[in-house]
Amino acid sequence: MPIGGPIHKAAVEVLNSFSLAGLWKGYCRGDMLGTAFYDNTGHSYVVRMANSNINAKKEARNAFWVTVLSLIPWKPRPNQGIPPAPADDESAARIVHSARAQRPVFTLKLSRATPTVTKTLTVVDGDIGPLKFRYLMAILASEFVTLAVGIINAAIWHSMFAIWYLAPLLLKITALLFHVRRNSINALQHQTTLSTPGTSEAEQKFSSTTNGSKGHDMMLCQIEGFSKGFFLIEGPSELLLQFFRHYGHPERHRKGGFGDRAREVISMFTVIGAILIYPAGLIAFIFAPITIQWVWLGYQLYAMLAMHIYRFGECEHIGTTQAWIARELLHHGSVSFDDGSGNRVVAELQSSTARSIADGQQEVERLVERLLEVHTQNDG
C-alpha cells in the first residue's frame, strides 16, 4: 500500500507499541513480541494426548503455520447434508443455516525435508535470509502511482515539488536495506528440544508416552478457537515447537555499526519518517502553483482509497510467504518450505468439512485418536 497518505494514526500506534515494549531503552532492552517487529497473533495451542486428555493452553506467538492454515481458501457447501427442497424461503433458510454452521478441519503434518522428497515438491522460499530482487520489485509496485505522479510533475511542469513523491519509496527502500535479522529454522539436534527450559511437564509426558524407545518425539497440537475452523498440526517436537516459540523472532545479539541494535533503531525511525511524509507535503504544497496543488490533492484521494481497499479488502497478506504456502497446499496438498537456512520443512495438508462446531469437535477427537494410535504403532 502507498504510504504518502495520512497514515499517522497507524504509525503512532506502532510507535506507541515500541514505547510500551521498552524498545527505546537500549541494546537488547524491551520485548519484541506484540510489536511490528514480531507480531503476536493471540492464538494459543494445546498438546493433545491419548484418552482425550488436553494440556494447558500455551501461546502460539506469531503462529506461522496457523496463519498459513487460516489463509487457505475454503467455502462452505450449501447443500451438504440437506436433501433437495422446493425453492422457498424456508428451505433457503435451512441451506443458509447449514452453510454458516460448517467449519473446515485441517490437519497439517510437518517433517524434515529429504533430497528425494524435495525433488517432487514446489519449494517456497521464505522472507528470512538474504534480500531478493522481488522484494525491491514489490516496493516499486506499491509506490508505482506515487512515482508516476512525481514524474508527471517533473516532466510537464518542471516542478521541484516532484521530489516529495520520492520520499515514500526512499523510506521503504531504507526499511528494506536495514531490516532486522530473524531466527531461522534450527538444524536437527542430537538432543531433543523437549529437554530445554520452558517445556511443560505435559509435553515431556506426551513424548515419553508416544515415542517408545526410538525417540522420534512426535507431537500433536490443536489450535484453540473455532472462528476459522479446526486446526491440528503434527510433527517432530524439535521442529514443531520452533514455530510456537522463537521462529522469526528478530536477532538482537550482533553489535557494530550495522549490528542488530542499529537496524532496530533505523527501522523505528522509518516509522517516524512515515508519520512526517503527509504533514510535510501538506505544508510544502501550500507554496506550490495551484495546478500542482490539484495534482497533489488527486494523489491524496488515490492514497486514501488504496488504504481503505488494503484494510477492508484483507490485503495485508498479499505477497507474503504464508499466502504463497497456503496456495500451494490448496492446489497440491504439500509443499517444501525453505527459509534460507537450508533446513527445509515439508508440509502436507489433509482437509475435511464439518457440518457444525459440534460435528467438528467430534471429528477432531477422531483424528486425534487415529493420529496418536499411528504414532504409537510406529514407535512401538
Image: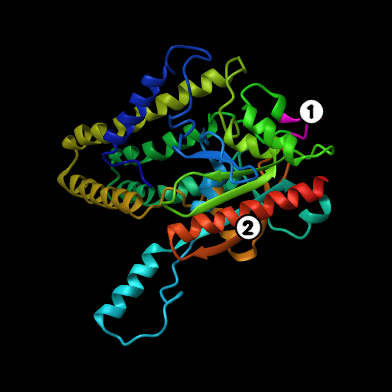
Crowdedness of circle 1 by 10 Å Cα count: few (<14), some, many (20+)? few
- Please state the total of marks drawn on the protein image: 2
Q: Is residue 359 left or right of residue 300?
A: right
**Nearer the observer, 228 or 332:** 228
Q: Residue at x 71, y 29 (%)?
A: 193
Circle 2 sits on which residue? Answer: 349
The residues bearing labels 1 and 2 have C-alpha atoms spaced at a distance of 28 Å
307 over 46 or under it: above or below: below
Instruction: Tell me the colour scheme of the image.
Output: rainbow
Crowdedness of circle 2 by 10 Å Cα count: few (<14), some, many (20+)? some
Pick whichever of labels 1 and 2 is earlier in the sequence.
1
Q: Amino acid at mark 1?
A: Gln
Q: Is residue 342 left or right of residue 96?
A: right
Q: Is residue 321 left or right of residue 81?
A: right
Which residues lie in the magenta part? Answer: 187-193
The chief SS type of the magenta part is loop
Q: Amino acid at mark 2?
A: Leu
Q: Residue at x 61, y 15 (%)?
A: 255
**Nearer the observer, 32 or 340:** 32
Question: Where in the figure is residue 83, as x and y percent of width and height?
Answer: 42, 82
Question: Where in the figure is residue 211, as x and y percent of width and height?
Answer: 77, 40
Circle 1 sits on which residue? Answer: 191
Q: Is residue 326 in view? A: no
Q: Residue at x 44, y 18 (%)?
A: 23
Query: Within the image, what quadrant is residue 181 found in?
Result: top right
**Nearer the observer, 204 or 195:** 204
Magenta segment: does it hold 283?
A: no
